[in-house]
Amino acid sequence: MKMMVALTLSGAGLTAYATAEPVKEGNPAAAVAAYGEKFRPQFHFTPKINWTNDPNGLVCYKGEYHFFFQHNPSGINWGNMTWGHAVSKDLVHWTQLDNAIAPDKLGTIFSGSAVVDWENTSGFGTADSKAMVCIYTAAGENGVPFTQCIAYTTDGRKFTKYDKNPVLPHIIGSNRDPKVIWYAPEKKWVMALFLDGDTYALFESKDLKAWTKLQDVKFPGHGECPDFFPMPVDGNKDNQKWVFTAANGDYLIGTFDGKVFTTDGNATRADYGANYYAVQTYSDIPAADGRRIQISWMNGGKYPDMPFNQQMSFPCEMKLRTFPEGLRICRLPVAEIKNIQGKNHTWKDQSIKTGENLLKDVAGGLYDIQMQVDLAGAKSLVIKCRGEAVTYSAEKKSVACLGKEAPAEPSNGKITLRILVDRTSLEVFANDGKAVMTSCFLPAPENTSLELSAEGGTPKILSMSVHELKSAWPTGK
Ligand code: FRU
């Protein structure tokens, strides 16, 4: 029997929730993944086999980073949506586990979030073991509407659906993608939910089971996968702002008093690349750590002849900083990337001369490139990564790659660039993460080269480091 699901317009273009293959018994954890396949990202999450899209339920629970993902357990394309599951101790090395939440009579399992219920508001925990509660959309079918449901676990491995699901009945259209946070001042939960068109809404609950609407949130031109969280301004915990993100990461900044979110202004663009979507940040990162870490689906990548389809972005730490033009979120790879950094090549105070490629001796094809450059009046700087140019144009004050462009104003004639190069992705972070471009590409597997060159002048490398990266997979190469 074929399953029919809804057809919707998504911020990423037209997402057709079209006819899907029936769910077959599938245990991806039992599947053998080589992880060394030629187009298998080596330090970005991919499922062993089959399709993935959104990151779901990002939560830190009992010392592990849990990572759930929209998954088709039995097909290489979208369908049969199920929550796949992986865990990591460092956000870099992932172990895929059995699927966590499977379709049922309320529908397939669309995107959502997870929280640790520290105060056992739901009653799902025990004295010794706090529960992790997952809040997801059941996507209905055959006349069953989209509703919001919950499931819980006390060991991070076995998940039980709440027997009185749904906890939030259908409101409108394909309402979906609940993101829940704990609002400590009032000891309550707050849910951000996508309703329809460009409208989201906030809800509150004391127990994760009964929800009351607080308000609508309009986000012109945006839809799906909301996230909602406070961030300290310039690291000052006494000066918090609230951030509301849409699926593509674009964000509204404002205030929230527990009842009403009020935006300070218009949306700000989060990413200038081609493949950044369905963003979500981690819940319950220990207070002593306190980071705000975001992961996205790198929607639209191509993986010819691979057993899996689609990949995630590298986890990034977000910071809210003050600039002359206002508050901006800056994003950089999490520090744990050091766990896969191998040989390091470094340079200091060196000019980029014509005909000389400083990067000719790097090897392996997986790189973490960091540089601080004094443009010294040069027109442009080009870093060719596995054949694909990342170009900084001094004239345009922007960085360009794979047909996309991001503004990057130099400061005193200097810029910083960080580039992560994997087998099928290029992530460019300009000016300490103020402008980010997250993109998929498909370089020839044998082209592992890096080339550095300049045009119209001789820029000076103030400092540069290129780490060759190791595969994060146990059997990857
Ligand atoms: C975003 C999205 C979500 C939905 C999920 C279905 O990519 O369309 O709105 O929950 O994917 O897989």
Image (spheres, rainbow, N blue to C red):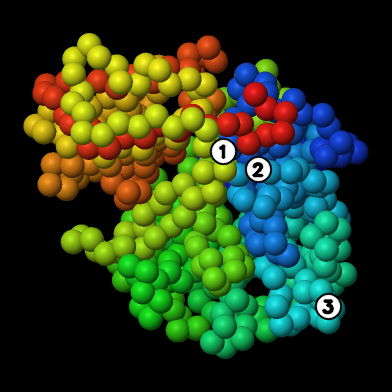
Side (left or right) of 124 relative to 93: right
Residue designated by label 1: 340
* Residue at 9 percent of width and 32 percent of height: 377
Q: Is residue 77 left or right of residue 339?
A: right
- Residue type pointed to by label 2: His
Q: Give the amino acid at mark 3.
A: Asp
Of residues 211 and 196, the one nearer the viewer is 211
Numbered disc in front, either 1 or 3: 1
Q: In 3D space, how far apart are the residues under numbered discs 2 and 1 (Cα atoms)?
A: 9 Å
Please report contact status of discs 2 and 1: CB closer than 8 Å, yes or no. yes
Q: Earlier in the sequence, mark 2 or mark 1?
A: 2
Residue for badge 2: 93
How far is the residue under mark 1 from the one under mark 3? 35 Å
Percent position of residue 319, x then y: 39, 60
Residue sitting at the far bottom? 186
Q: Where residue 443 sits in the image (x, y, percent)?
A: 49, 18
Instruction: Identify residue for label 3.
Output: 128
- Amino acid type at circle 1 is Ile
Asked if disc 1 and disc 3 are in contact, CB closer than 8 Å, the reply is no
Question: SS for tag 2?
Answer: loop
